[in-house]
Image (cartoon, grey):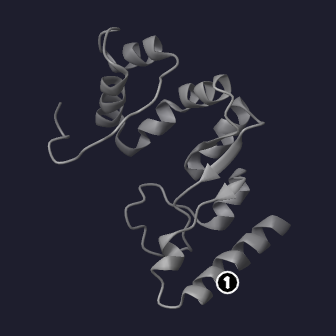
Amino acid sequence: MSGFSTSVRLFDGRIDGRDDLARALGVAQSASDADLVARAFERWGIDAPAHILGQRVAAAVAAGCGGIVCATADVREAKQLAPRLLAVVPGIRPAGSDPNDQARPATPGAALTAGADLLVVGRAVTRADDQAAAAEAIAGEVSVAARG
């Protein structure tokens, strides 16, 4: 596969609807799940999760999970497919801040407006010069968005 010589992707999961995904990717039905995920990233890049979101949500529901981790851009669709699942959204950053390694970061307000239930905030606070002020700013944005 091209494009993966300098990166490592680890996949430990199950793909529901794998035959449909294999057809969409133009690969053999016998391809491994790991190969399907790698091909999806090769074809769609950082947008690959959106193309397999339905399978991820179905697998979470079938397994009895209480939630799914997804980007803000995927929350609405995930909630439409399985409204009872909690949507946990990583990559939360204040507007204009460094996205670091987050491919699809979002502000707290955008995530909550999309329907996120839990926000994962890390480096936006832990790497801030003034961690208390950074945490307060994010909490303030959450408060404003929650009043909506």
Q: Is residue 126 above or below residue 66?
A: below
Crowding at mark 1 (Cα within 10 Å: few <14, some 14-19, many 20+): few
Location of the N terminus (image quadrant):
top left
Q: Which one is nearer the viewer's eye here, 50 or 37? A: 37
Left or right of residue 144: residue 126: left
Q: In this view, does 62 lie above or below 142?
A: above
Q: Is residue 51 left or right of residue 9?
A: right
Q: What element carries label 1?
A: helix
Q: Observer-nearest residue: 131 or 21?
A: 131
- Residue beneath label 1, please? 136
> Looking at this rendering, what residue extends furthest in the top direction?
29
Q: Taking 91 as reference, is 145 left or right?
A: right
Q: Position of residue 124 (x, y in %)?
A: 51, 74
Residue drawn at x 54%, y 33% is 53
Percent x, y of residue 61 = 67, 27
**Whether residue 46 can be seen here:** yes
Q: Where is residue 92 in the image (x, y as percent from the top left)?
A: 56, 64
Q: What quarter of the picture does the C terminus occupy?
A: bottom right
Q: Can residue 148 be seen in this view?
A: no
Q: Tell me the kind of residue under disc 1.
A: Glu
What residue is at 72 percent from the left and 53 percent from the top?
117
Dividing the picture into quarters, in which one does residue 100 lie?
A: bottom left
Q: Quadrant of residue 35?
A: top left
Residue drawn at x 59%, y 25% as measured from the top left: 59
Q: Where is residue 74 in the image (x, y as percent from the top left)?
A: 59, 43
* Image: 12 above or below 148: above
Q: Tell me if 121 is positioned left or right of 10 in this view.
A: right
